[in-house]
Amino acid sequence: MKLTFLLMIMLQVSTWATGFSQESRVSLQMKDVSLEKVILELRDQTGIRFFYSIDKIKSIEHLSIIATNEMLKDVLNRLLEGTGLTYTLLDNVIVIKDITEVDQVRRAVRLKGWVVDEKKQALPGVTIKLMGTSVGTATDSRGWFSIVLPVTEGRLEFSFVGFSTQIVDFNRTSERDTMRVILKENVVNMDEVVVTGYQSVKKKAMAGSFSKVEAKDLVMTGSQTLEQMLQGKLPGVMVVNQSGLTGTRQKVRVRGTSTLVGNAEPVWVVDGIIQQDPLPFSTSELTNIGDDNMDMIKNFIGGAISWLNPNDIQDITVLKDASATAIYGTKAANGVIVITTKKGERGRLALSYTGNFSVGEKLDYDKLEIMNSKQRVDLSREAYQRGAQVPNDKIGYIGLALAYQRGEISFEDFNNGAKKLESVNTNWFDVLYQTPFSHSHSLSFSGGNDNSTYYASLGYSNNENTAKGNSQTSYTGRLNLSSTFWNKLRLNVALSGSHAETSAFASGVDPFSYAINTNRAIACYQENGDLFYYDNDGRGYDYNILNELKYSGNENRSRNLNISVDVRWTMMEGLVFATTLGGNTTSTFGETWFTERTNYVARLRGYNYGEHDVYDEEFKLSRLPYGGVLTVDENESFNYSWRGQFEYVKNLGRHSINVMVGGELTSNKYKSYSQTNYGYMPERGLSFVDVPLGTRPSSDVNYTLNDAYARTKPSVSKSLSNTISYYISGSYMFDNRYALISR
């Protein structure tokens, strides 16, 4: 018997019916109908329950039957004659089965019992279901139930709104006993709350639109940021990766973008404290700075919650509509993401370890539709033979063909060179990419007694990118303390810190773009093992991607320290005074550099590295004869906020009132410093050399050598903003179902 295909049609017997009797009479006049339709008609006339397998009766159709006040048993016998089915009466239930399965039906189990709560009060309407099937019943007004099951053993599921689901095993011996099941009240489900950042309200009292996700539902692979973990978990929340590099910022949008020129980032709130971006400008301005090196540095500075260890999160709530603006004001127009961190739990010391290890997949040409060397040479040969306009390349098939056309090489050299190009087939993904291994570890401690609890955690993660040379290492620490005094005063203190270091590539050095777009007929190494250099832009400067990666780079460091103090004083029943004080300081340091051996500096210098010495005229006229370029960017921020508010909650039976009145003070202070220096010699103790007065570089370079040391003037900016606001909000619930909210 396949229980997954069983369907039990149950109808409550009307008050005038006392149960099934084989003497029950029915009247039918049906033509060209299915067996199932006849059964449904019999059920409607008699109020009797039928139990049958849909698979066994769905193919029996085109039946015709006429009966006038006939006994039910006679109608069933005529109806099932020749179908291979029969019926059995089992405790006021008609079971329709194969003739060969009648004995199995007779071995079914009949169970009875009653369901109560922890106070031994009867629970009417409790749903009782045979797990894995739709067979079930419900308790009556006294909490009693009786059910016939088509199997001799299995599991029953008892469920009721506001109570935890109970699973009970049964077998043939259970039939002789009266079952008594006790359901435990599920307080969390009955009184679920929504954290808005200013207060916690019951879910049914929340008038606005919101989405909530528990930490256990987030996929924490150890190689993702918190923003990436939210992707696909919260309706209306979109996460956009601006780059495939590890350590870059992500854009988060709630309900789309609400502004074209302003800051479109949502408001991040952690334990009631609004988190500020570590940069002294909105992230939308990143594309307007004008310095590619500076842009690259700032792209690796974390966002408002990059310091937070995802393993410390309890739950995340997103406020998405006008109610968020009613709570936070106009700054919440882009949505509010409220994060609640874990607190200590009463009991003995509990130690928890979470570790994640992940191995990525290296990119490969097999998954990309990119020409190999022979295909690329064939394409160039066809284009050249058809007279297509082709660039005057010095390498590749076109370079050979043009050299042969000018008479610089013989046909034999041309032919041998073309065959050699067809066999190069450089795998740039093997050269530039790797199979990344990332891992993260988190160790937490929790415990306490009835008056005080504590939670502490330490985290470490190391994330590698598939591109060689791009990785991020981060360290986090957190301490949460909670204490209750005199049963009226609740104190919560949280202290957290983080340190992150990111290694990446300088501006313009993009391994992915290079591997995708570079001709595979170009070699990476010469036959003797040395690097193979070529002119990549037709300006005469040597280029090799490995040389650029070796002698340029981008390093970033970010440090963060947070502290928050939350006090709640119950002044009297229903009246609470709450105050929150939070502070945050963040410092970031980033640098990107090109040494004198790079193609980037060769274009500044005017010739390739080592091509001229101090006696040559080109050396004397060079804008940058010595050293390379170093760009540095530093940011410091300090912000604090204080909030004090009175909360009044009054339950009026079927109605309730919730009023909140308070004030808030916030202060944000930023300091930023950036500078580009020339003559940088990292291989000589990170020193600088004096370079002559220069003129403005060519138009494709963003720097001006404007003093005797060829260093740009530093750019220093400071900003300070203070805000004081007052607010009042309230809600009134009618019949504990409908709420009005105002601010």
Image (cartoon, rainbow, N blue to C red):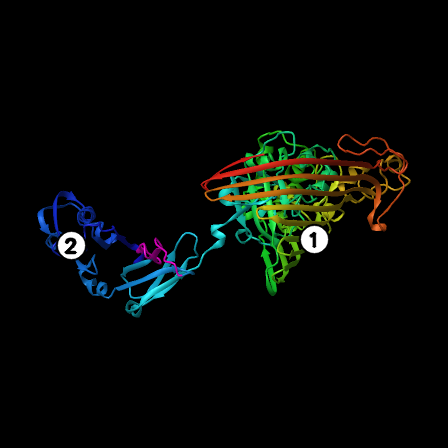
Near mark 2 (Cα within 10 A), the count class, few <14, some 14-19 or many ≥20, is few
The residue that label 1 is drawn on is 495
User: Against 709, is 569 above or below?
Assistant: below
User: Which stretch appears magenta?
Assistant: 120-142
Q: Is residue 394 visible?
A: yes
Q: 336 or 702, which is in the foreground?
A: 336
Lateral position of residue 183 relative to residue 100, left or right: right
The residue that label 2 is drawn on is 83
The spot of residue 91 in percent (x, y) is: 21, 60
Lateral position of residue 709 relative to residue 507, left or right: right
**Residue at 82 percent of width and 33 percent of height:** 704
Q: 339 or 742, which is in the foreground?
A: 742
Q: Give the residue type at disc 1.
A: Leu
The spot of residue 252 in percent (x, y) is: 60, 40
Q: Quadrant of residue 711?
A: top right
Give the Cα distance between marks 2 and 1: 76 Å
Q: Which mark is residue 151?
A: none
Q: Are the residues at dot 2 and dot 1 in contact (C-beta closer than 8 Å)? A: no
**Residue at 68 percent of width and 45 percent of height:** 302
Secondary structure mostly seen in magenta is loop
The spot of residue 502 in percent (x, y) is: 70, 49
Number of dots carrying numbers? 2
**Residue at 64 percent of width and 53 percent of height:** 490
Callout 2: SS:
loop
Q: Earlier in the sequence, mark 2 or mark 1?
A: 2
Q: Is residue 576 magenta?
A: no
The spot of residue 422 in percent (x, y) is: 60, 45
Q: Is residue 129 magenta?
A: yes
Q: Give the residue type at disc 2.
A: Thr
